[in-house]
Image (tube, coloured by chain):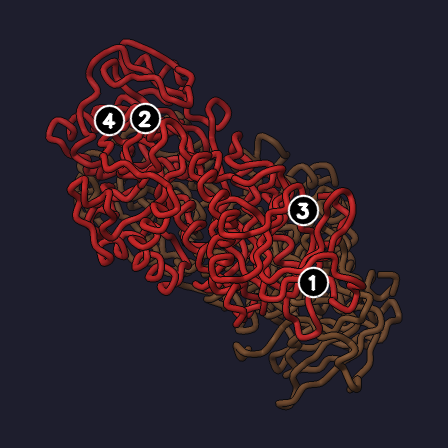
Chain colours: A red, B brown
Amino acid sequence: MPNSESTTALAESDVSTWDLRTEVLIVGFGGAGACAAIESARAGAATTVLERASGGGGTTALSTGVCYLGGGTRVQRDCGFADSVDDMLAYVRLAAGQGVDEDRIRLFCESSVEHFDWLCELGVEFKSAYEPEKTTHPFGEEGLHLSGNENVHPFAEHARPVPRGHKPRHPGEAGAYLMRVLNRAAETAGAEVLCDCRARRLVKNAAGRVVGVVARRDNRDVTIRAERGVILCAGGFIMNERMLQKHAPLLLRCNYKAGCPGDDGLGIVIGEGGGAEAINMSEGLVLNAYYPPGKHVMGILVDANGQRFIDEDAYIGRASDAMLRVADGRAWLVVDNELYGVTQVPHRLAAVEESFAALEESLGMPRGELVHTIDTYNRHARRGEDPLFHKSRDYVRPLHVPPYAALDCTTSGSIYGALTLGGLSTSALGAALDAQGQPIAGLFAAGRNAAGLCREGRTYASGLSIADATFFGRVAGRVAASGRW
Amino acid sequence: MPNSESTTALAESDVSTWDLRTEVLIVGFGGAGACAAIESARAGAATTVLERASGGGGTTALSTGVCYLGGGTRVQRDCGFADSVDDMLAYVRLAAGQGVDEDRIRLFCESSVEHFDWLCELGVEFKSAYEPEKTTHPFGEEGLHLSGNENVHPFAEHARPVPRGHKPRHPGEAGAYLMRVLNRAAETAGAEVLCDCRARRLVKNAAGRVVGVVARRDNRDVTIRAERGVILCAGGFIMNERMLQKHAPLLLRCNYKAGCPGDDGLGIVIGEGGGAEAINMSEGLVLNAYYPPGKHVMGILVDANGQRFIDEDAYIGRASDAMLRVADGRAWLVVDNELYGVTQVPHRLAAVEESFAALEESLGMPRGELVHTIDTYNRHARRGEDPLFHKSRDYVRPLHVPPYAALDCTTSGSIYGALTLGGLSTSALGAALDAQGQPIAGLFAAGRNAAGLCREGRTYASGLSIADATFFGRVAGRVAASGRW
């Protein structure tokens, strides 16, 4: 966006004519926007979607397409996993992170089977097959895997571990496939989609209700009246360096921005310009994929002093957050010859040596520290234990087959992906809230444009963001279409 | 504030009569507000200050009163310390933290001697005497001490260490003394002060300019017209649990709120209601005062696995941040019998034993880990070195005189103080900025109501917040009084 453009809501009295009229206007045609559009159009509201890019998909289309679903879906049952709403609630309360309201968590968990069925009815296929390997990149067609910290300390002590990562049936990354289905369904349901059209500010009437937007199309401003409401689904702000500087400077240390070009925060800024509050803005999901291969989890992560700092079987978002915050971006994965494998996002070999003494020297660590760490780790590992970091017994075994290797997981030497988890404050039903917690009439937000169900990278599970975006996108679509907000 | 009160700026057209009229209206009569009032009134503008409490002082009055000043002040020169603007610039660039603009840092450092002289002319006394002990609580009358990370790795490698903590001449905590001088000077300069009067929303005209406020006084609303501008100096939000939840949940783990009752963020929320953006909202200063006594710095801080995690000679804000973020709130200070002393904010003795093996057992740490940490520390300390965390040679000596003690520095067992460092986005001259970085005409902010010069607890130095508040309060007062914004 040109820097000089105001994003403060325009007064309706300053709109001379409305170029277009609709009932529900949705900004952004990614996972949240598409689902909002489907539900709004199906509810009978005239529904229009504005998309900046030349086609829909957004960041969801660039992802593996995994949705965090449970409570007893068809795939879970077919694969022999018993899940319940209560089990899911217990886990999602931990995974959602600080500050998430219980209403939102309940609505999500209680509706999860219904949301799964809804996706299936739209035509999204999920294969009833379980992928047992610990992975962040489920590239097969299997529909179910353990995608978060379910089996990990301290989560496993508080919630019964059940796999809930549901991957659409598509080889490799399935996000584009998922979005083709959702985008098509929105158009089939009757939503009108205007591509190459960028919303740039809201319009509010004298009573403070959001009644439309000003958008940019074909190089000129277009005013669009939305009788029932505007839903902001325009993504996060990982592509906006200035916003990261102001709100989440730690994420600037991540060298790979996990997003699409539209993730520049404009939807959040437009919402703020309409009086909504942005919250949780410092949080993000950080990803340094030292596994798969799953056997890497049997290695140990160490910092510049050769000390461990996290249980290596943590979900990658949790481990990577610790690499950045606890190890200050100076981390290495140490494996022995049996565990070494090539990561999908390749990691440089920082050192390979026949002994740990030589390895710590090669890495420039203080003498004796890595050696001590390994001695301690191996001593306990022989008994299948990890009293320091409580790694699960399944991944604890001594490192004893030379040569030993250190994979570079430093911020300067490896790929740190990041996306933002802050956005507009919303009610559980998607209404955008001001700094006092009061809803702004006619304004809604969903997906990463909002601070939703997934608030912290260190508790995150794969599929939470897409599940949040698609589910609460639907909710916002229905509520807006009702015209009662 | 009652939850139902709107803080969205009122349209001027909705103001039927103005109950009071002034030129510059200042919200809050703490360090920032008092200095803004002095400068505004001295510049000839009719100046009115609104204070919620029954008297001025704010959080500055509850503090030690230390100001971070340098570049060659009279006290620095008298004590034999050579300082320069360039040396100060080099250090403040590190201490300010992520995201601070160079303009702001330059203005602050280049004006620091002038600001010191200005405080002296008002009648704030500073004694030309140096306090050499490493302390966070300079309780003597000495006017100068090393108040931050100047001597600490990695700061000391990038900026020549010079003491810049200037404490007003007053035994014990000097903040109340400092504020008596500043509050009196504001009234002497001609500012009108309305106590027991709470600003509750801004008023904007049709052009978007802030032209006044609605305030609450004697249980009814009062409208106050401000011809030249409104300066928000109403402090941070450490007293507002809901705001902490939304923006800085980590600070909820701190059990002592370093602020006055007015630090509920209302000034920030009012600014947001006028279109300003709040930034850096997740950051705070965390304080667990394991020293003084300064000799405690020769002890070591360890986590639940008996591992060190920070150089113990770090400024307490830096060390405490690491206790919370890196050690996850489970930290202990280990000292030997020679180093043990009583802290001013008392710490519980978690364990006292004749050996480190017994100490680690008493603390429930994995066997051998604390013993190894001590072995390593002592081995290097005998040579005056600390290759793991680079503690300064002055504070490195082996721990070898039994009994050995562990002071409880856990979040559950000790006092963690906290204050917030996020607030409204401002230009270096104090103009409040919207999400696009555009100034909002007629609106200014200073002190902890703004995201100012001190943005991160982990780089902070004692006195930065008061220096920022008083200096940039003055700047905002002058700029607002000029009537050109």
Label 3 marks which chain's residue? A
Q: Earlier in the sequence, mark 1 or mark 4?
A: 1
Tell me, yes or no, if residue B115 can be seen here.
Answer: yes
- Residue identifier under label 3: A198
Residue B74 place in picture, x, y as percent? 74, 50
- Please name the residue that numbered disc 4 is placed on: A298
Answer few, some or many: residues within 10 Å of disc 3's Cα (few below 14, many 20 plus, some between 14 and 19): many
Kindly identify which chain the residue marked by label 4 belongs to: A
Q: Total marks drawn?
A: 4
Going by the numbered disc 3, the residue's amino acid type is Arg
- Indicate which disc, 4 or 2, sits on the residue closer to the N terminus: 2
**Spatial distance from mark 4 to mark 2, Cα to Cα?**
11 Å
* Screen quadrant of the N terminus of chain A: top right
Disc 4 and disc 3: Cα gap in Å? 48 Å
Identify the residue at horizontal 71%, vertical 55% (top origin): A214
For the residues labelled 1 and 2, the Cα–Cα distance comes to 48 Å
Give SS at disc 3.
strand
Q: Callout 2: helix, strand or loop?
A: loop
